[in-house]
Image (cartoon, grey):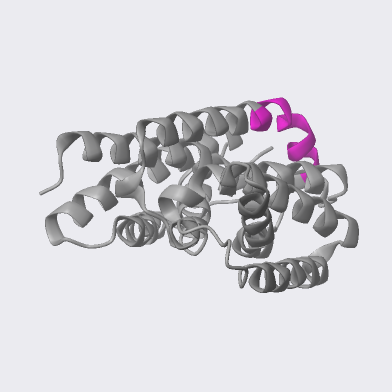
Amino acid sequence: MLSSGIMQRALAEAIVLGLACGPLGVWILLLKRSYAAESLSHAMLPGLVLASLVGIPLLFGATAGVLVAAVLIALVGGDVGVAVVVTALFGLGGILALSPATPPRLNELLFGDLLGVTASDVLVAAALCAGVLLALALTYRTLSLAAFDGRGGRADLLLLAILGVTTVAAVQGLGNLLLVALILAPAAAALNLATRLPSVLVTAAGLAALAGVLGLIVSYELDLAAGASIALCAIITSSLGLLKPKVRHAII
């Protein structure tokens, strides 16, 4: 049986990640960068391996990897940029991962271990997510204008950088294969449940946090993987948006 401390840390991590992932997902959908959200996390692999080889914290390497990918994707532009950059970086990471010095916790970072997070992991995730929310608040006008007129440019680079930091914050708990569900599913529901953009952002944060809590409960009761349970609950929670006739696009 899991100790109360483990569950409390996992619960805190899930809520913190949900509060950041939900609003970010709204901007991802409005600016039509879903493919980037699904693919960008794979670009952290070479950064992780290089960090292990030079003996620096793995999260630093993950941060460097996704931020470099965000810049390259923004420069190349479009889905082609995502496909080329992420595939190249993931391939490079696969080659580097063959090194004998590959970190033993690499699989945990790729697939997530929410029940294994420490108090320091929760604090790091909270700090990164607070930075994400602050960045979203400071770039609200820029992102709103980009979503309204359909132009990317600087907004694309900002959004991809914020997405990169969120990926780093969430990867240890959820893993890069499951993170996208918590980013996109609650946001999709929120866009259908509310019409004003501020309400959409708040609703998305609430739904994502709720998915985290429900996922942990399901994981505990049915003895399932925590990250997978949260991802499934995020998808199920997003179906709330289907209970209401589709509303018009959020007003910027």
- The C terminus lies in which quarter of the figure? top right
* 62 with respect to 186 (left or right): right
* 185 with respect to 118 (left or right): right
Where does residue 53 sit, x and y in percent of width and height? 65, 54
Q: Which segment is the magenta one? A: 135-146
Residue nearest the observer in this picture, 186 or 110: 110
Q: Residue at x 20, y 49 (%)?
A: 217
Dominant SS type (magenta)? helix
In which quadrant of the rendered view does residue 134 lie?
top right
Where does residue 168 sit, x and y in percent of width and height? 58, 46
Q: Residue at x 81, y 72 (%)?
A: 80
Where does residue 130 sit, x and y in percent of width and height? 55, 27
* 212 with respect to 188 (left or right): left
Q: Is residue 96 magenta?
A: no
In which quadrant of the rendered view does residue 6 lie?
top left
Note whether 23 is above or below 119 in the view shown. Answer: below
Q: Residue at x 37, y 53 (%)?
A: 113
Where does residue 40 sit, x and y in percent of width and height? 66, 59
